[in-house]
Image (spheres, grey):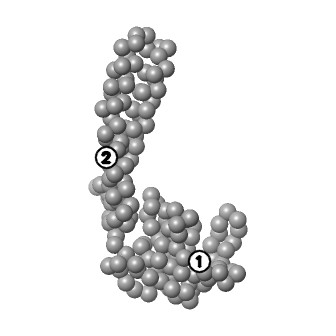
Amino acid sequence: MAVVEKVPMLAEGYEKLTADLKLLREERPRIVDAIEEARAHGDLSENAEYHAAKERQGQVEASIADLEDRVSRAQIIDPKTLSGDRIVFGATVTMRDEDDKPVRYQIVGQTEADAKKGRISYSSPMGRALIGRKVDDEVEVTVPSGERFYLIKKIEFI
């Protein structure tokens, strides 16, 4: 029997996925109408509108299938309910880099990651390096620009 792998995410990530799914489902009838309208123009072999609508239909259906899969496997985690002295999914980590500058990240799901907002995926190189660590641990991370070193100063569940 196949084991269904849960996809951890925060509540806001789940809400975004379900909102995206709703929008795509609402687009379905419009695509069908566009296909019908293009079909009414006659010869389908040289009908660009028909081919574009069919291609968009394929993209939307693939996206819907992907989102439905992730939503069905979602494991919603509220960081406020977590505690402990180790970094886990949902934790907000404050570190010092090699130049003693503060760096702060929250460990989130893949669809929620946005490095500019200080949110990194648990499956990213940095996320994998941080999971399971505790305060005063030194972390070495290989990133595209080379090796980076950090010292963990604080772990919060906010």
Q: Position of residue 154 (x, y in %)?
A: 51, 86
Reading the chain from its start, which is encountered first: label 1 or label 2? 2
Q: Position of residue 74 (x, y in %)?
A: 33, 60
Can residue 114 be seen here? The reply is yes
Quadrant in which the C terminus is drawn: bottom left
Q: Position of residue 66 (x, y in %)?
A: 38, 47
The residue under the point 33% across, 35% down is 28
Residue type at mark 1 is Val
Residue type at mark 2 is Lys
Q: Position of residue 5 (x, y in %)?
A: 36, 60
Q: Quadrant of residue 150?
A: bottom right
Q: For mark 2, give the secondary structure.
A: helix
Q: Quadrant of residue 2?
A: bottom left
Q: In this figure, which residue is indicated by the disc labeled 2?
A: 22
Q: Residues within 10 Å of mark 1 (few under 14, many from 20)?
A: some
Eyeballing the image, is 133 above or below 90?
below
Eyeballing the image, is 94 above or below 110?
below
Foreground of the two, 76 or 13: 13
Q: Quadrant of residue 30?
A: top left
Quadrant in which the N terminus is drawn: bottom left
Q: Is residue 103 left or right of 53 when viewed as pictured? A: right
Q: For mark 1, give the secondary structure.
A: strand
Q: In this figure, which residue is indicated by the disc labeled 1?
A: 103
